Amino acid sequence: MQFRQKSKVNSYSLKAGFTLLEVIMVIALMALLATITISYYGNTVGNMNLDDAANAIIYDVRNAQAKAMNGADGNKWGTCFRNPTSGYDIYEIVSPPGVTACSGATIISTFFLPNAVVFSAPSDSNTTSVIFDKITGTTSADSTMTLAYKGQTRNIIITSSGKIY
């Protein structure tokens, strides 16, 4: 009985490499994964900017409330949220409040919202003021400020009893 031996050259040459279809499928899959990763990363960074801005505002408003409760400088303390028609949205720590809360007040600190984060409440060209009473840290009315970034929003709520969240 004779066995026929296959040529090594022929058997390897037929099985080596990838087909064009396999290469195209791998490239398409990698492109799809890259697109998903990039869009997820962009949304995550945006949400982090929005959360960071909201947390910074809450911190600063609580700080102004604490100064009012401690009677710092013997004045009420507050925060003015400004949404100008043009320019950057800002909020200011003020003491003592002016006649109309923000108008004529002494500005202690001014803070700009991070890039692309804006106020949707107060609306364009409006200002909202939150003034804390001495000792009690309460306000005259509930207030809600809304931050927005690429369709996402975060509310900052200040109740008349002084709760900030």
Image (spheres, helix red, strand yellow):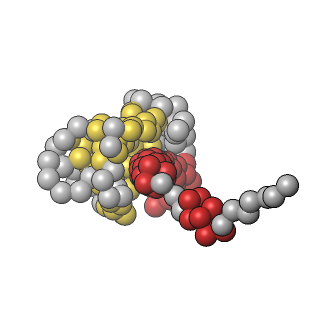
Name the residue furthest left.
86
* Residue lying at 69% horizontally and 62% vertically, measured from the top left: 6
Rendered location of residue 60, percent (x, y) = 47, 54
Q: How many marks?
A: 0
**Does 158 appear above or below 27?**
above
Q: Is residue 5 left or right of residue 60?
A: right
Q: Is residue 22 left or right of residue 109?
A: right
The residue closer to the viewer here, 131 or 34, is 34
**Does 109 appear above or below 84?**
below
The residue closer to the viewer here, 73 or 22, is 22
Residue 39 visible, this angle: yes
Rendered location of residue 82, percent (x, y) = 26, 48
* Residue lying at 24% horizontally and 43% vertically, measured from the top left: 127
* Residue lying at 52% horizontally and 58% vertically, measured from the top left: 18
Rendered location of residue 126, percent (x, y) = 20, 41
* Residue lying at 42% horizontally and 30% vertically, measured from the top left: 142
Residue 77 visible, this angle: no
**Does 155 appear above or below 96?**
above
The residue closer to the viewer here, 1 or 22, is 1
Name the residue furthest right.
1
Q: Where, quadrant-wise, is the N terminus in this rendering? A: bottom right
Name the residue furthest front.
1
Rendered location of residue 141, percent (x, y) = 40, 29
The residue closer to the viewer here, 79 or 48, is 48
